[in-house]
Amino acid sequence: MIAAARVDPITVEVIKNSLVYASEEMGIAVRNSAYSPNIKDRLDHSCAIFDAQARLIAQAEHIPVHLGSLPWGLRATLATIDGMGLQMAPGDMWVVNDPYISGTHLNDVTVIRPIFVGERLVGYSASKAHHTDVGGAVPGSMSADAEELFGEGLVIAPLRLMRGDVVQPEIIALVRSNSRNPHARSGDLKAQIAGSITGERRVLALIESYGLETYESALERILDESERALRAQLASFRPGRYEVEEAMEDLEGNASVWIRLALTIADGGVTLDYTGTSPQVNFPINAVYGVTLSGIYYVVRALTDPTIPMNDGCFRPITVHIPEGSLLNPRRPASVSGGNVETSQRNADTVLRAFADAAPERVPASSGGTMSNVIVGGVDANGEAWTFYETNGCGMGARPNADGIDGIQAHMTNTLNTPIEAMEHYLPIRVTRYEFAEGTGGAGKYRGGFGLVRSWKMLEGSGRASLIAEHHTFGPGGLRGGANGAPGEHYIVHDGERKKLPGKINVPMSAGDEIIVQSPGGGGWGPPE
Protein backbone atom coordinates (compact mmCIF):
# COMPACT_ATOMS: atom_id res chain seq x y z
CA MET A 1 0.00 0.00 0.00
CA ILE A 2 2.92 2.40 0.66
CA ALA A 3 4.24 1.85 -2.85
CA ALA A 4 0.77 2.32 -4.28
CA ALA A 5 0.40 5.66 -2.52
CA ARG A 6 3.34 7.05 -4.52
CA VAL A 7 1.46 6.72 -7.81
CA ASP A 8 -0.43 9.89 -8.70
CA PRO A 9 -4.19 9.50 -9.38
CA ILE A 10 -3.90 10.55 -13.03
CA THR A 11 -1.40 7.78 -13.77
CA VAL A 12 -3.65 5.27 -12.01
CA GLU A 13 -6.61 6.34 -14.18
CA VAL A 14 -4.57 6.13 -17.38
CA ILE A 15 -3.32 2.62 -16.56
CA LYS A 16 -6.78 1.48 -15.43
CA ASN A 17 -8.54 2.64 -18.58
CA SER A 18 -5.72 1.41 -20.81
CA LEU A 19 -6.11 -2.08 -19.36
CA VAL A 20 -9.89 -2.04 -19.82
CA TYR A 21 -9.52 -1.08 -23.45
CA ALA A 22 -6.74 -3.65 -23.89
CA SER A 23 -9.22 -6.36 -22.88
CA GLU A 24 -11.74 -4.94 -25.35
CA GLU A 25 -9.08 -4.96 -28.06
CA MET A 26 -8.38 -8.60 -27.25
CA GLY A 27 -12.03 -9.33 -27.99
CA ILE A 28 -11.86 -7.46 -31.28
CA ALA A 29 -8.85 -9.56 -32.31
CA VAL A 30 -10.70 -12.78 -31.49
CA ARG A 31 -13.83 -11.66 -33.33
CA ASN A 32 -11.99 -10.52 -36.45
CA SER A 33 -9.89 -13.71 -36.66
CA ALA A 34 -12.54 -16.32 -35.84
CA TYR A 35 -13.85 -18.81 -38.38
CA SER A 36 -17.20 -19.82 -36.87
CA PRO A 37 -20.34 -17.65 -36.96
CA ASN A 38 -20.86 -18.34 -33.26
CA ILE A 39 -17.77 -16.28 -32.42
CA LYS A 40 -17.41 -13.82 -35.29
CA ASP A 41 -21.14 -13.03 -35.61
CA ARG A 42 -22.69 -13.85 -32.22
CA LEU A 43 -19.58 -12.75 -30.25
CA ASP A 44 -19.71 -15.78 -27.96
CA HIS A 45 -16.31 -15.08 -26.42
CA SER A 46 -14.77 -13.12 -23.53
CA CYS A 47 -11.36 -11.68 -22.64
CA ALA A 48 -9.64 -10.52 -19.47
CA ILE A 49 -6.27 -9.47 -18.04
CA PHE A 50 -4.81 -10.62 -14.71
CA ASP A 51 -1.84 -9.69 -12.54
CA ALA A 52 0.96 -12.03 -11.44
CA GLN A 53 -1.15 -13.19 -8.48
CA ALA A 54 -3.95 -14.30 -10.87
CA ARG A 55 -6.18 -11.45 -9.69
CA LEU A 56 -8.58 -10.04 -12.27
CA ILE A 57 -7.36 -6.57 -13.28
CA ALA A 58 -9.52 -5.71 -16.28
CA GLN A 59 -12.20 -7.36 -18.38
CA ALA A 60 -14.11 -6.44 -21.49
CA GLU A 61 -17.88 -6.08 -21.45
CA HIS A 62 -18.42 -9.50 -22.94
CA ILE A 63 -20.40 -12.45 -21.50
CA PRO A 64 -21.15 -12.45 -17.74
CA VAL A 65 -21.12 -16.23 -17.37
CA HIS A 66 -17.63 -16.36 -18.91
CA LEU A 67 -16.13 -13.42 -17.11
CA GLY A 68 -17.16 -14.35 -13.59
CA SER A 69 -15.69 -17.82 -14.03
CA LEU A 70 -12.41 -16.78 -15.66
CA PRO A 71 -10.69 -15.71 -12.38
CA TRP A 72 -11.73 -18.93 -10.64
CA GLY A 73 -10.73 -20.95 -13.68
CA LEU A 74 -7.31 -19.32 -13.97
CA ARG A 75 -6.48 -20.09 -10.34
CA ALA A 76 -7.69 -23.68 -10.72
CA THR A 77 -5.65 -24.08 -13.92
CA LEU A 78 -2.49 -22.79 -12.23
CA ALA A 79 -3.06 -25.14 -9.28
CA THR A 80 -3.53 -28.09 -11.68
CA ILE A 81 -0.35 -27.25 -13.58
CA ASP A 82 1.55 -26.97 -10.29
CA GLY A 83 0.11 -30.31 -9.19
CA MET A 84 1.59 -31.89 -12.32
CA GLY A 85 5.01 -30.57 -11.34
CA LEU A 86 4.99 -28.06 -14.20
CA GLN A 87 4.96 -24.29 -14.45
CA MET A 88 4.28 -21.67 -17.06
CA ALA A 89 7.35 -20.29 -18.83
CA PRO A 90 8.08 -17.38 -21.19
CA GLY A 91 6.72 -18.13 -24.66
CA ASP A 92 4.04 -20.49 -23.33
CA MET A 93 0.35 -20.49 -24.06
CA TRP A 94 -1.95 -23.00 -22.39
CA VAL A 95 -5.34 -24.39 -23.38
CA VAL A 96 -7.96 -26.01 -21.13
CA ASN A 97 -11.69 -26.79 -21.28
CA ASP A 98 -12.25 -29.20 -18.36
CA PRO A 99 -15.23 -27.54 -16.59
CA TYR A 100 -13.98 -28.65 -13.18
CA ILE A 101 -10.82 -26.64 -13.85
CA SER A 102 -11.70 -23.89 -16.32
CA GLY A 103 -15.09 -23.17 -14.79
CA THR A 104 -17.89 -23.40 -17.41
CA HIS A 105 -18.56 -26.27 -19.87
CA LEU A 106 -16.61 -28.24 -22.48
CA ASN A 107 -17.55 -26.03 -25.42
CA ASP A 108 -15.91 -23.04 -23.71
CA VAL A 109 -12.22 -23.38 -24.53
CA THR A 110 -9.91 -21.18 -22.44
CA VAL A 111 -6.55 -19.98 -23.75
CA ILE A 112 -4.06 -18.45 -21.28
CA ARG A 113 -0.89 -16.50 -22.05
CA PRO A 114 1.52 -15.85 -19.17
CA ILE A 115 3.12 -12.41 -19.47
CA PHE A 116 6.80 -12.06 -18.57
CA VAL A 117 9.25 -9.19 -18.36
CA GLY A 118 12.50 -11.05 -18.81
CA GLU A 119 12.14 -14.04 -16.50
CA ARG A 120 9.70 -12.29 -14.15
CA LEU A 121 6.02 -13.17 -14.36
CA VAL A 122 3.91 -9.99 -14.38
CA GLY A 123 0.46 -11.23 -15.37
CA TYR A 124 -1.77 -13.24 -17.69
CA SER A 125 -4.03 -12.54 -20.64
CA ALA A 126 -6.86 -15.00 -21.15
CA SER A 127 -9.74 -15.61 -23.50
CA LYS A 128 -12.68 -17.99 -23.38
CA ALA A 129 -14.72 -18.82 -26.50
CA HIS A 130 -17.58 -21.19 -27.21
CA HIS A 131 -16.45 -23.72 -29.83
CA THR A 132 -19.51 -25.01 -31.65
CA ASP A 133 -18.53 -28.69 -31.52
CA VAL A 134 -15.99 -30.52 -29.35
CA GLY A 135 -17.21 -34.05 -29.98
CA GLY A 136 -19.53 -36.01 -27.72
CA ALA A 137 -22.73 -37.91 -28.34
CA VAL A 138 -24.61 -35.23 -30.29
CA PRO A 139 -23.67 -32.54 -32.80
CA GLY A 140 -22.78 -29.38 -30.91
CA SER A 141 -21.66 -31.32 -27.80
CA MET A 142 -24.61 -30.24 -25.63
CA SER A 143 -26.89 -33.23 -25.24
CA ALA A 144 -30.11 -32.52 -23.34
CA ASP A 145 -29.86 -35.82 -21.46
CA ALA A 146 -26.13 -36.50 -21.02
CA GLU A 147 -25.64 -38.35 -17.73
CA GLU A 148 -21.95 -37.61 -17.27
CA LEU A 149 -19.23 -35.27 -18.49
CA PHE A 150 -17.62 -37.80 -20.81
CA GLY A 151 -20.71 -37.93 -23.02
CA GLU A 152 -20.41 -34.20 -23.66
CA GLY A 153 -17.18 -34.19 -25.64
CA LEU A 154 -13.41 -33.89 -25.52
CA VAL A 155 -12.05 -33.04 -22.05
CA ILE A 156 -8.81 -31.05 -22.21
CA ALA A 157 -6.70 -30.86 -19.07
CA PRO A 158 -4.26 -27.92 -19.13
CA LEU A 159 -1.91 -28.42 -22.10
CA ARG A 160 0.76 -26.24 -23.69
CA LEU A 161 -0.73 -24.84 -26.87
CA MET A 162 2.47 -22.87 -27.49
CA ARG A 163 6.01 -23.56 -26.34
CA GLY A 164 8.76 -21.03 -26.99
CA ASP A 165 6.24 -18.93 -28.97
CA VAL A 166 5.65 -21.84 -31.36
CA VAL A 167 2.19 -23.38 -31.74
CA GLN A 168 2.28 -27.10 -30.95
CA PRO A 169 0.74 -28.89 -33.95
CA GLU A 170 -0.12 -32.03 -31.99
CA ILE A 171 -2.47 -30.04 -29.71
CA ILE A 172 -4.22 -28.48 -32.70
CA ALA A 173 -4.52 -31.98 -34.19
CA LEU A 174 -6.01 -33.30 -30.95
CA VAL A 175 -8.75 -30.67 -30.96
CA ARG A 176 -9.42 -31.03 -34.70
CA SER A 177 -9.72 -34.81 -34.54
CA ASN A 178 -12.36 -34.58 -31.80
CA SER A 179 -14.67 -32.17 -33.61
CA ARG A 180 -17.20 -32.57 -36.40
CA ASN A 181 -15.87 -29.26 -37.78
CA PRO A 182 -12.08 -29.52 -37.60
CA HIS A 183 -11.37 -26.55 -39.86
CA ALA A 184 -13.40 -24.20 -37.69
CA ARG A 185 -11.87 -25.55 -34.49
CA SER A 186 -8.30 -24.83 -35.52
CA GLY A 187 -9.32 -21.46 -36.91
CA ASP A 188 -11.09 -20.42 -33.71
CA LEU A 189 -8.13 -21.56 -31.61
CA LYS A 190 -5.83 -19.38 -33.71
CA ALA A 191 -8.23 -16.47 -33.16
CA GLN A 192 -7.90 -16.94 -29.41
CA ILE A 193 -4.14 -17.05 -29.75
CA ALA A 194 -4.32 -13.67 -31.52
CA GLY A 195 -6.47 -12.28 -28.71
CA SER A 196 -4.15 -13.39 -25.92
CA ILE A 197 -1.05 -12.12 -27.73
CA THR A 198 -2.80 -8.75 -28.15
CA GLY A 199 -3.39 -8.58 -24.40
CA GLU A 200 0.23 -9.41 -23.68
CA ARG A 201 1.49 -6.68 -26.01
CA ARG A 202 -0.69 -4.02 -24.40
CA VAL A 203 0.40 -4.93 -20.87
CA LEU A 204 4.07 -4.91 -21.86
CA ALA A 205 3.63 -1.53 -23.56
CA LEU A 206 2.20 -0.07 -20.33
CA ILE A 207 5.07 -1.48 -18.29
CA GLU A 208 7.57 -0.07 -20.75
CA SER A 209 5.93 3.35 -20.56
CA TYR A 210 5.56 3.63 -16.77
CA GLY A 211 7.95 1.09 -15.30
CA LEU A 212 7.09 -2.15 -13.55
CA GLU A 213 7.04 -0.66 -10.04
CA THR A 214 4.59 2.07 -11.03
CA TYR A 215 2.46 -0.41 -12.97
CA GLU A 216 2.16 -2.85 -10.06
CA SER A 217 1.53 -0.06 -7.55
CA ALA A 218 -1.24 1.28 -9.77
CA LEU A 219 -2.84 -2.16 -9.84
CA GLU A 220 -3.07 -2.20 -6.05
CA ARG A 221 -4.75 1.19 -6.09
CA ILE A 222 -7.20 0.06 -8.79
CA LEU A 223 -8.23 -3.03 -6.80
CA ASP A 224 -8.59 -1.13 -3.52
CA GLU A 225 -10.68 1.60 -5.13
CA SER A 226 -13.12 -0.93 -6.60
CA GLU A 227 -13.47 -2.63 -3.23
CA ARG A 228 -14.19 0.64 -1.41
CA ALA A 229 -16.72 1.75 -4.03
CA LEU A 230 -18.59 -1.56 -3.98
CA ARG A 231 -18.70 -1.70 -0.18
CA ALA A 232 -20.14 1.82 -0.13
CA GLN A 233 -22.88 0.70 -2.52
CA LEU A 234 -23.71 -2.40 -0.49
CA ALA A 235 -23.89 -0.31 2.68
CA SER A 236 -26.84 1.54 1.12
CA PHE A 237 -28.87 -1.70 0.91
CA ARG A 238 -31.24 -2.69 3.72
CA PRO A 239 -29.27 -5.01 6.02
CA GLY A 240 -30.70 -8.35 7.05
CA ARG A 241 -31.08 -11.99 6.11
CA TYR A 242 -33.20 -12.87 3.09
CA GLU A 243 -34.20 -16.44 2.17
CA VAL A 244 -35.52 -17.44 -1.26
CA GLU A 245 -35.91 -20.54 -3.41
CA GLU A 246 -36.43 -21.13 -7.13
CA ALA A 247 -37.42 -24.35 -8.90
CA MET A 248 -35.86 -25.69 -12.08
CA GLU A 249 -37.45 -28.14 -14.51
CA ASP A 250 -36.28 -31.71 -15.04
CA LEU A 251 -36.39 -33.64 -18.33
CA GLU A 252 -40.11 -34.28 -17.91
CA GLY A 253 -40.80 -30.62 -17.21
CA ASN A 254 -41.48 -31.11 -13.50
CA ALA A 255 -40.37 -28.38 -11.10
CA SER A 256 -38.30 -30.82 -9.08
CA VAL A 257 -34.82 -29.28 -8.77
CA TRP A 258 -34.36 -26.47 -6.27
CA ILE A 259 -31.96 -23.60 -5.76
CA ARG A 260 -32.17 -22.37 -2.16
CA LEU A 261 -30.33 -19.30 -0.95
CA ALA A 262 -29.91 -17.37 2.28
CA LEU A 263 -28.49 -13.89 1.60
CA THR A 264 -27.09 -11.84 4.47
CA ILE A 265 -26.23 -8.15 4.06
CA ALA A 266 -24.17 -6.52 6.79
CA ASP A 267 -21.28 -4.09 7.24
CA GLY A 268 -20.81 -3.33 3.55
CA GLY A 269 -20.57 -6.97 2.58
CA VAL A 270 -22.79 -9.87 1.49
CA THR A 271 -22.78 -13.56 2.37
CA LEU A 272 -24.56 -16.12 0.20
CA ASP A 273 -25.29 -19.58 1.61
CA TYR A 274 -26.77 -22.20 -0.74
CA THR A 275 -27.37 -24.85 1.93
CA GLY A 276 -30.52 -26.78 1.03
CA THR A 277 -29.99 -26.61 -2.73
CA SER A 278 -30.81 -29.89 -4.50
CA PRO A 279 -28.05 -32.49 -4.91
CA GLN A 280 -26.42 -32.78 -8.32
CA VAL A 281 -28.58 -34.53 -10.92
CA ASN A 282 -27.91 -37.08 -13.68
CA PHE A 283 -28.75 -34.72 -16.53
CA PRO A 284 -26.74 -31.70 -17.65
CA ILE A 285 -28.06 -28.77 -15.61
CA ASN A 286 -25.38 -29.04 -12.93
CA ALA A 287 -23.39 -25.80 -12.71
CA VAL A 288 -19.75 -25.97 -11.69
CA TYR A 289 -18.59 -23.62 -8.92
CA GLY A 290 -17.22 -21.03 -11.35
CA VAL A 291 -20.59 -20.70 -13.10
CA THR A 292 -22.36 -20.13 -9.78
CA LEU A 293 -19.86 -17.45 -8.84
CA SER A 294 -20.52 -15.77 -12.18
CA GLY A 295 -24.21 -15.35 -11.39
CA ILE A 296 -23.43 -13.90 -7.98
CA TYR A 297 -20.86 -11.43 -9.28
CA TYR A 298 -23.13 -10.41 -12.12
CA VAL A 299 -26.08 -9.57 -9.87
CA VAL A 300 -24.00 -7.65 -7.34
CA ARG A 301 -22.47 -5.61 -10.15
CA ALA A 302 -25.82 -5.07 -11.87
CA LEU A 303 -27.44 -3.72 -8.69
CA THR A 304 -24.61 -1.38 -7.76
CA ASP A 305 -22.75 1.37 -9.62
CA PRO A 306 -21.95 0.33 -13.22
CA THR A 307 -19.04 2.78 -13.32
CA ILE A 308 -17.08 0.75 -10.75
CA PRO A 309 -14.34 -1.07 -12.69
CA MET A 310 -14.89 -4.83 -12.59
CA ASN A 311 -11.84 -6.46 -11.06
CA ASP A 312 -10.75 -8.61 -8.14
CA GLY A 313 -11.48 -5.81 -5.70
CA CYS A 314 -15.20 -6.25 -6.42
CA PHE A 315 -15.04 -9.84 -5.17
CA ARG A 316 -13.63 -8.99 -1.72
CA PRO A 317 -16.95 -7.96 -0.08
CA ILE A 318 -18.62 -11.23 -1.21
CA THR A 319 -18.53 -14.48 0.79
CA VAL A 320 -20.01 -17.64 -0.71
CA HIS A 321 -20.84 -21.09 0.65
CA ILE A 322 -22.01 -23.75 -1.83
CA PRO A 323 -22.26 -27.34 -0.58
CA GLU A 324 -20.10 -29.75 -2.55
CA GLY A 325 -22.09 -32.32 -4.46
CA SER A 326 -25.01 -29.96 -4.98
CA LEU A 327 -26.55 -28.67 -8.21
CA LEU A 328 -24.39 -25.53 -7.97
CA ASN A 329 -21.12 -27.24 -7.00
CA PRO A 330 -21.22 -30.79 -8.42
CA ARG A 331 -18.61 -33.47 -8.08
CA ARG A 332 -16.85 -34.74 -11.17
CA PRO A 333 -17.94 -36.29 -13.54
CA ALA A 334 -21.46 -34.83 -13.37
CA SER A 335 -22.65 -33.50 -16.75
CA VAL A 336 -22.65 -29.69 -16.88
CA SER A 337 -23.27 -28.40 -20.41
CA GLY A 338 -26.69 -26.94 -19.56
CA GLY A 339 -25.60 -25.63 -16.19
CA ASN A 340 -23.48 -23.03 -17.91
CA VAL A 341 -26.42 -21.66 -19.88
CA GLU A 342 -29.61 -22.52 -17.96
CA THR A 343 -28.70 -22.93 -14.29
CA SER A 344 -26.56 -19.80 -14.51
CA GLN A 345 -29.70 -17.89 -15.55
CA ARG A 346 -31.87 -19.39 -12.81
CA ASN A 347 -29.18 -18.73 -10.21
CA ALA A 348 -29.10 -15.08 -11.29
CA ASP A 349 -32.91 -15.02 -10.89
CA THR A 350 -32.54 -16.45 -7.39
CA VAL A 351 -29.91 -13.93 -6.30
CA LEU A 352 -31.96 -11.06 -7.71
CA ARG A 353 -35.01 -12.29 -5.75
CA ALA A 354 -32.92 -12.38 -2.60
CA PHE A 355 -31.99 -8.71 -3.09
CA ALA A 356 -35.58 -7.66 -3.92
CA ASP A 357 -36.48 -6.54 -0.39
CA ALA A 358 -33.03 -5.17 0.35
CA ALA A 359 -33.00 -2.88 -2.70
CA PRO A 360 -36.61 -2.74 -3.92
CA GLU A 361 -36.03 0.27 -6.17
CA ARG A 362 -33.32 -1.57 -8.12
CA VAL A 363 -34.53 -5.15 -8.66
CA PRO A 364 -36.65 -6.08 -11.73
CA ALA A 365 -39.13 -8.92 -12.09
CA SER A 366 -37.78 -12.18 -13.44
CA SER A 367 -36.59 -12.21 -17.03
CA GLY A 368 -37.03 -15.24 -19.29
CA GLY A 369 -34.63 -17.25 -17.14
CA THR A 370 -33.25 -19.23 -20.08
CA MET A 371 -30.92 -18.87 -23.03
CA SER A 372 -33.32 -21.03 -25.14
CA ASN A 373 -30.40 -22.99 -26.57
CA VAL A 374 -30.58 -24.51 -30.04
CA ILE A 375 -27.78 -26.94 -30.85
CA VAL A 376 -28.08 -28.70 -34.19
CA GLY A 377 -25.92 -30.49 -36.70
CA GLY A 378 -25.87 -33.21 -39.27
CA VAL A 379 -24.63 -34.20 -42.70
CA ASP A 380 -25.60 -32.27 -45.83
CA ALA A 381 -26.37 -33.66 -49.29
CA ASN A 382 -22.64 -33.78 -50.10
CA GLY A 383 -21.80 -35.81 -47.02
CA GLU A 384 -20.19 -32.84 -45.23
CA ALA A 385 -20.73 -32.52 -41.48
CA TRP A 386 -22.02 -29.24 -40.07
CA THR A 387 -22.99 -27.88 -36.65
CA PHE A 388 -24.75 -24.78 -35.43
CA TYR A 389 -25.36 -23.24 -32.01
CA GLU A 390 -27.18 -20.18 -30.81
CA THR A 391 -28.97 -18.77 -27.82
CA ASN A 392 -32.20 -16.85 -28.25
CA GLY A 393 -33.42 -13.67 -26.62
CA CYS A 394 -36.33 -13.67 -24.16
CA GLY A 395 -38.57 -11.19 -22.43
CA MET A 396 -36.73 -9.03 -19.92
CA GLY A 397 -38.48 -8.63 -16.57
CA ALA A 398 -40.29 -5.36 -15.98
CA ARG A 399 -38.30 -2.80 -14.01
CA PRO A 400 -39.42 -0.67 -11.05
CA ASN A 401 -39.71 2.30 -13.41
CA ALA A 402 -40.16 0.88 -16.93
CA ASP A 403 -41.47 -2.00 -18.99
CA GLY A 404 -39.19 -4.92 -19.71
CA ILE A 405 -37.40 -5.07 -23.05
CA ASP A 406 -38.70 -7.40 -25.77
CA GLY A 407 -36.65 -10.23 -27.23
CA ILE A 408 -33.30 -9.47 -25.57
CA GLN A 409 -30.41 -11.62 -24.37
CA ALA A 410 -30.88 -11.06 -20.64
CA HIS A 411 -28.60 -11.48 -17.63
CA MET A 412 -25.91 -14.15 -18.02
CA THR A 413 -25.61 -13.96 -21.80
CA ASN A 414 -24.51 -10.92 -23.73
CA THR A 415 -24.29 -12.32 -27.24
CA LEU A 416 -25.94 -11.20 -30.45
CA ASN A 417 -28.31 -13.30 -32.52
CA THR A 418 -26.92 -15.16 -35.51
CA PRO A 419 -27.67 -13.09 -38.62
CA ILE A 420 -30.10 -14.88 -40.90
CA GLU A 421 -27.75 -14.24 -43.82
CA ALA A 422 -24.93 -16.06 -42.00
CA MET A 423 -27.13 -19.04 -41.11
CA GLU A 424 -28.41 -19.48 -44.65
CA HIS A 425 -24.97 -18.94 -46.21
CA TYR A 426 -23.02 -21.42 -44.10
CA LEU A 427 -25.66 -24.01 -43.22
CA PRO A 428 -28.36 -26.08 -44.99
CA ILE A 429 -30.98 -24.04 -43.13
CA ARG A 430 -33.69 -21.57 -44.13
CA VAL A 431 -35.11 -19.25 -41.47
CA THR A 432 -38.91 -19.23 -41.71
CA ARG A 433 -39.93 -16.89 -38.89
CA TYR A 434 -38.31 -14.36 -36.55
CA GLU A 435 -40.54 -12.04 -34.55
CA PHE A 436 -41.66 -10.99 -31.07
CA ALA A 437 -44.08 -13.32 -29.30
CA GLU A 438 -46.57 -10.58 -28.50
CA GLY A 439 -48.57 -10.87 -25.29
CA THR A 440 -46.07 -13.15 -23.54
CA GLY A 441 -44.90 -10.49 -21.06
CA GLY A 442 -46.53 -10.52 -17.64
CA ALA A 443 -49.03 -7.76 -16.91
CA GLY A 444 -48.24 -5.15 -14.29
CA LYS A 445 -47.84 -1.47 -13.59
CA TYR A 446 -44.95 -2.10 -15.95
CA ARG A 447 -45.31 -5.11 -18.25
CA GLY A 448 -42.69 -7.75 -18.81
CA GLY A 449 -40.88 -7.90 -22.13
CA PHE A 450 -42.15 -10.21 -24.85
CA GLY A 451 -40.29 -13.36 -25.76
CA LEU A 452 -39.53 -14.11 -29.38
CA VAL A 453 -40.32 -16.76 -31.97
CA ARG A 454 -37.53 -18.05 -34.18
CA SER A 455 -38.00 -20.98 -36.52
CA TRP A 456 -35.98 -22.58 -39.29
CA LYS A 457 -36.21 -25.50 -41.70
CA MET A 458 -33.48 -28.03 -42.51
CA LEU A 459 -33.17 -28.12 -46.28
CA GLU A 460 -31.20 -31.31 -46.95
CA GLY A 461 -29.51 -34.30 -45.41
CA SER A 462 -30.21 -35.51 -41.91
CA GLY A 463 -29.27 -34.36 -38.43
CA ARG A 464 -30.13 -33.99 -34.80
CA ALA A 465 -31.22 -30.99 -32.75
CA SER A 466 -30.75 -30.54 -29.02
CA LEU A 467 -33.07 -28.02 -27.38
CA ILE A 468 -32.28 -26.90 -23.82
CA ALA A 469 -34.48 -24.33 -22.12
CA GLU A 470 -36.13 -23.43 -18.82
CA HIS A 471 -39.56 -21.99 -17.96
CA HIS A 472 -41.52 -24.32 -20.23
CA THR A 473 -43.81 -25.52 -17.42
CA PHE A 474 -44.23 -22.31 -15.44
CA GLY A 475 -43.45 -18.76 -16.48
CA PRO A 476 -40.95 -16.27 -15.04
CA GLY A 477 -42.20 -14.64 -11.87
CA GLY A 478 -43.65 -11.17 -11.55
CA LEU A 479 -42.65 -8.85 -8.70
CA ARG A 480 -44.58 -6.53 -6.36
CA GLY A 481 -47.90 -7.87 -7.59
CA GLY A 482 -46.97 -8.18 -11.26
CA ALA A 483 -48.15 -11.21 -13.25
CA ASN A 484 -45.86 -14.02 -14.41
CA GLY A 485 -44.55 -14.06 -17.95
CA ALA A 486 -45.76 -16.76 -20.35
CA PRO A 487 -43.76 -20.02 -20.52
CA GLY A 488 -41.68 -20.89 -23.55
CA GLU A 489 -42.63 -23.48 -26.16
CA HIS A 490 -40.82 -25.81 -28.59
CA TYR A 491 -42.31 -27.46 -31.68
CA ILE A 492 -41.15 -29.62 -34.57
CA VAL A 493 -42.99 -29.82 -37.88
CA HIS A 494 -42.40 -33.21 -39.53
CA ASP A 495 -44.29 -34.34 -42.66
CA GLY A 496 -46.62 -31.39 -42.19
CA GLU A 497 -47.55 -32.37 -38.62
CA ARG A 498 -46.76 -29.92 -35.83
CA LYS A 499 -45.75 -31.58 -32.55
CA LYS A 500 -45.00 -29.91 -29.22
CA LEU A 501 -41.64 -30.78 -27.66
CA PRO A 502 -40.37 -30.56 -24.06
CA GLY A 503 -38.02 -27.83 -22.89
CA LYS A 504 -35.07 -30.23 -22.85
CA ILE A 505 -34.83 -32.82 -25.63
CA ASN A 506 -32.67 -34.33 -28.37
CA VAL A 507 -34.68 -34.83 -31.54
CA PRO A 508 -33.70 -36.41 -34.91
CA MET A 509 -34.29 -34.33 -38.02
CA SER A 510 -34.61 -35.00 -41.73
CA ALA A 511 -34.82 -32.76 -44.76
CA GLY A 512 -37.90 -30.55 -44.62
CA ASP A 513 -38.28 -30.65 -40.84
CA GLU A 514 -38.84 -27.34 -39.09
CA ILE A 515 -37.92 -26.36 -35.53
CA ILE A 516 -39.93 -23.61 -33.81
CA VAL A 517 -38.63 -21.96 -30.64
CA GLN A 518 -40.70 -19.53 -28.59
CA SER A 519 -38.85 -18.07 -25.61
CA PRO A 520 -40.57 -17.06 -22.34
CA GLY A 521 -41.81 -13.57 -21.60
CA GLY A 522 -40.61 -11.52 -18.64
CA GLY A 523 -42.58 -11.04 -15.43
CA GLY A 524 -44.55 -7.87 -14.73
CA TRP A 525 -43.71 -5.35 -11.97
CA GLY A 526 -46.39 -3.88 -9.74
CA PRO A 527 -50.16 -4.51 -9.70
CA PRO A 528 -51.69 -4.50 -13.22
CA GLU A 529 -54.48 -2.15 -12.14
Image (cartoon, rainbow, N blue to C red):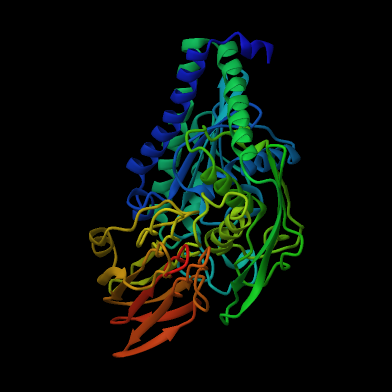
Q: In the picture shown, does residue 194 fall above or below 480?
A: above
Q: In the picture shown, does residue 198 fall above or below 259?
A: above
Image quarter for residue 3? Answer: top right
Image quarter for residue 155? Answer: bottom right
| In the image, farthest residue toward the top | 6
Q: In the picture shown, does residue 357 fall above or below 28?
A: below
- In the rendered image, residue 260, in percent from the top left (x then y), is placed at 69, 63
- In the rendered image, residue 292, in percent from the top left (x then y), is placed at 63, 54
Instruction: Report the side of 12 relative to 457 (left or right).
Output: right
Say which of 403 and 498 sits in front: 403
Number of callouts: 0
Q: Dividing the image into 4 quarters, which one contains the N terminus?
A: top right
Say which of 399 and 317 sits in front: 399
- In the rendered image, residue 19, in percent from the top left (x then y), is placed at 47, 26
Residue 465 visible, this orientation: yes
Image quarter for residue 354? Answer: bottom right
Instruction: Report the side of 457 relative to 179 (left or right).
Output: left
Say which of 61 and 33 sits in front: 61
- In the rendered image, residue 216, in percent from the top left (x then y), is placed at 60, 18
Q: Dividing the image into 4 quarters, which one contains the C terminus?
A: bottom left
| In the image, farthest residue toward the front | 529
Residue 201 visible, this orientation: no
Instruction: Report the side of 112 relative to 435 (left or right).
Output: right
